[in-house]
Structures are given as structure tokens and as C-alpha cells.
Image (cartoon, rainbow, N blue to C red):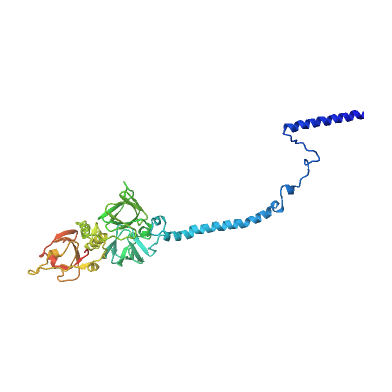
């Protein structure tokens, strides 16, 4: 019995050995079989195999080590923000000054006018000697003209102001605005001076309605320029469109340049047959001193508005007389000369009463004898006007 049992066990071992050999031959002689007492099934040390140490297995310690990195990143970000928004805006304008790049760097505008100023918001506002409509009109103020505000303790809705050329008088309070943005140069791109006798300001660039009419020597500022038109800022907060013909485009801080005397004469002649108005500056009503003021200003020679001050402008002309007859030589008064005349009812007076402008040899532009309009008048050595000449002043060389 024992022999039979041993024989069966021997056959079983031979069979297993044979099968292992076949398996080893099939996989290249390497047997995946490992004896139970070999590496298979051996207990493993997880801490050794996976390299788990205290620093890797503790979350709190890892968080503490990230704090310095976050603080450093935040500091760098804050530095960059300060550099971009505070340092660069101060440094770049000076660095790129006088280069083409400077055109693309926005500058902080410097404002001229504070709350002690007002601006004229109508085409022309009368400056009166007293706070009464029946008092003497000193001159007129043109649209968008800034003035110093002095007092509103006046009668009849007048306020006391001083012009930028130091004339003190009264104007209607509702003809002024406190919003000075329309005449602040650095808030705009273009300065526009009206050279025509007048210009219309329209609500649209084409097919618009009339907003206002502005007179010669009015100064407006524009932000948009298109073919043949400008969009101008008006003192009442509105914007309007004006054609580019008959205007002078300047840089916002540039003054009108002096031109030839013939342009001055041409500007003055546009007012022939205009209605005469004491102290007036527009075609709706103009005085001779007002005409000299706007015509000279638009052609680059600013002069005072009042007759008493105009008599000292330019250079005095030395009049020439005939050696035999002692008559005035008419051609000694040139086109463009300002001729100051005395009161016809006060012979021999040296106080200026009115002004005339010589437009050509022997022709004066002056108030008509009826006192209602501006007319051209021819004169010669025998004319009564010659005996009234106080002085002649020459603006243009």
C-alpha cells in the first residue's frame, strides 16, 4: 500500500516538473513560478517602499512653507501696479518730449479759469456803463469770451464784470455762463477764429438747424475736424457744426499771426452799409471803433476796443502838405491807416470824436452823415473832413 502511495506521488512530481519545463520553454526559459518561501508573498515596509516621511504626510507643514512665496508674489504684483500707474505717467512724457510718440501720451490739461470767471453764451452781449439798459454802451462782448465776475449786487438783472482787456461794466446775468469748458484751450484740439463777417453754427454737419450766428473775431474751440466742417463747443453746453470756409484754424495756444494790410482793409470793407451802433461789434450793429477792433484782431494785430485807447496804437503818421498851397497831400494817408476826427460842432477840438479807416487813397470808411450806417466817403484837400483830422495812426508797416 505504501509503495503504491509513493508511486502516485512520484508520478505527480514528474508531471508537474514536465509542465514547468514546457512553460519555461514557451516564455524563453523564465518561469513566473516562485516558490512560497521565495520573494512572492513577502511582507513589505510601506514607509520604505513609498518613501513616506513626516514632511510628506503632514499637510499643515506644507501650508506653512507656501506663505513666504505668496507674500513675495503679492509684493511683486503691488510694485508693478505702482510702477505702471504712478511712475510711468510721470516719467514717459518727459522721456518722449519733442518726439512723435509724445502725441500719443495723454497729458493732464491745465485749466485757466476758476469760479471767479464767466463766459458769454450769446452772439454779442452789450457792456453798459451802468446797470441800466438806457445807459451808455461801452462795447460788446462776443460769444465764448471769458470775463472776470465782480458782483451780482446790481439792478435790473445785471452783473458787474471786467473784461480780459480791463474794461469794467455791466452785462445781463442771463447772457453769461459759469461753465468755462468751452473756452479752456487744453480741453480741445483746435482753436477757430471767425474771419468772415459772420458764420452760422448748425446742429448737424449737413441739413442741420441753426443754433447760433457768430460774428467776426469770435474765438471757438473744436474737437472734431472733417472735410469742410468743424464740430465746435458752445458755451451753453451744446455742440454745433461750422463750415471751414472763412475761419482761421490755430493751435489751441496759438495767436492769430499778423498779415498784410490789404487783408485788414478787406475785413473792414465787409461792413460797408452795416447798421451803425454805438459800441457795436457785429454786422447787426457796429461802431467804427468796434470795426477797427474786430478787423485788426482777426488779422493778427489786437488793439483796444475804446476810441480813447485806440488813438495811441500803432505809429503816428507824419502828414505831408503842399509847400505852396499848404493843402494836405491826400496820398500821405495810406490804406489801412486809422484816421481820428474831432467833433464837427467843436472846431479846433483835440478830443477824438469818431474814427475812420482809409481803404484806398482819398477814400475813408466812416459813419454816414445820417449816423445810421457805415459808408465809404471820398475826400480831397478841400473836404470838411480834412479840417477835423486830429491824428493818423498806422497799424501795419
Give left or right: position of 90 versus 346.
right
Splitting the image into 4 quarters, where does residue 331 fall? Answer: bottom left
Residue at position x 80%, y 32% in the image = 17
Image side of residue 84 versus residue 16, left or right: left
In the rendered image, the vertical position of residue 100 relative to residue 343, given as above or below: above
Q: Up-down: is 28 above or below 366?
A: above
Residue 166 image position (x, y, % from top left): 31, 67
State the image coordinates of residue 224 (x, y, percent, origin top left).
35, 52
Considering only vertical position in the picture, is 105 above or below 343?
above
User: Which residue appears at 68% of the width and 55% of the height?
Assistant: 61
Q: Quadrant of the C terminus?
A: bottom left
> Residue 239's x, y, as percent?
35, 53
Q: Splitting the image into 4 quarters, where does residue 14 fall? A: top right
Where is the N terminus found, in terms of image quarters?
top right
Q: Position of residue 325 (x, y in %)?
A: 7, 68
* Of residues 81 and 354, the one drawn nearer to the viewer in this rendering: 81
Q: Is residue 393 visible?
A: yes
Amino acid at each position: 500500500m505504501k509503495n503504491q502511495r509513493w508511486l502516485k506521488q512520484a508520478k505527480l512530481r514528474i508531471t508537474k516538473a514536465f509542465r514547468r519545463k514546457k512553460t519555461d520553454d514557451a516564455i524563453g526559459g523564465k518561469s513566473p513560478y516562485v516558490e512560497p518561501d521565495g520573494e512572492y508573498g513577502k511582507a513589505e515596509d510601506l514607509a520604505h517602499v513609498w518613501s513616506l516621511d513626516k514632511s510628506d504626510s503632514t499637510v499643515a507643514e506644507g501650508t506653512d512653507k507656501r506663505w513666504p512665496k505668496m507674500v513675495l508674489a503679492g509684493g511683486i504684483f503691488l510694485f508693478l501696479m505702482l510702477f505702471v500707474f504712478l511712475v510711468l505717467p510721470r516719467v514717459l512724457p518727459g522721456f518722449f518730449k519733442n518726439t512723435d510718440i509724445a502725441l500719443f501720451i495723454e497729458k493732464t490739461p491745465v485749466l485757466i479759469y476758476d469760479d471767479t470767471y464767466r463766459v458769454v453764451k450769446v452772439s454779442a452781449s452789450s457792456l453798459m456803463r451802468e446797470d441800466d439798459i438806457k445807459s451808455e454802451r461801452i462795447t460788446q462782448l462776443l460769444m465764448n469770451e471769458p470775463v472776470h465776475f465782480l458782483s451780482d449786487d446790481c439792478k435790473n438783472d445785471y452783473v458787474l464784470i471786467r473784461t480780459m482787456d480791463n474794461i469794467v461794466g455791466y452785462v445781463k446775468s442771463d447772457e453769461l455762463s459759469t461753465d468755462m469748458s468751452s473756452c479752456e484751450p487744453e480741453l480741445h484740439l483746435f482753436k477757430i477764429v471767425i474771419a468772415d463777417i459772420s458764420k452760422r453754427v448748425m446742429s448737424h454737419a449737413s441739413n442741420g438747424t441753426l443754433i447760433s450766428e457768430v460774428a467776426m473775431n469770435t474765438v471757438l474751440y473744436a474737437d472734431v475736424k472733417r472735410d469742410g466742417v468743424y464740430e465746435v463747443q458752445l458755451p451753453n453746453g451744446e455742440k454745433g457744426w461750422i463750415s471751414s470756409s472763412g475761419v482761421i484754424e490755430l493751435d489751441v495756444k496759438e495767436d492769430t499771426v499778423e498779415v498784410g494790410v490789404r487783408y485788414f482793409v478787406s475785413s473792414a470793407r465787409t461792413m460797408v452799409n452795416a447798421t451803425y451802433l454805438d459800441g457795436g461789434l457785429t454786422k447787426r450793429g457796429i461802431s467804427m471803433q468796434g470795426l477797427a477792433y474786430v478787423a485788426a484782431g482777426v488779422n493778427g494785430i489786437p488793439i483796444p476796443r475804446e476810441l480813447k485807447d485806440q488813438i495811441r496804437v500803432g505809429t503816428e503818421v507824419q502828414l505831408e502838405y503842399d509847400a505852396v498851397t499848404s493843402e494836405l497831400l491826400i496820398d500821405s494817408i495810406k490804406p489801412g491807416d486809422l484816421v481820428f476826427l474831432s467833433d464837427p460842432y467843436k472846431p479846433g477840438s483835440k478830443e477824438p470824436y469818431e474814427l475812420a479807416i482809409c481803404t484806398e487813397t482819398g477814400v475813408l470808411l466812416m459813419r454816414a452823415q445820417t449816423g445810421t450806417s457805415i459808408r465809404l466817403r471820398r475826400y480831397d484837400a478841400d473836404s470838411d473832413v480834412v479840417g477835423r483830422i486830429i491824428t493818423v495812426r498806422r497799424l501795419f508797416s
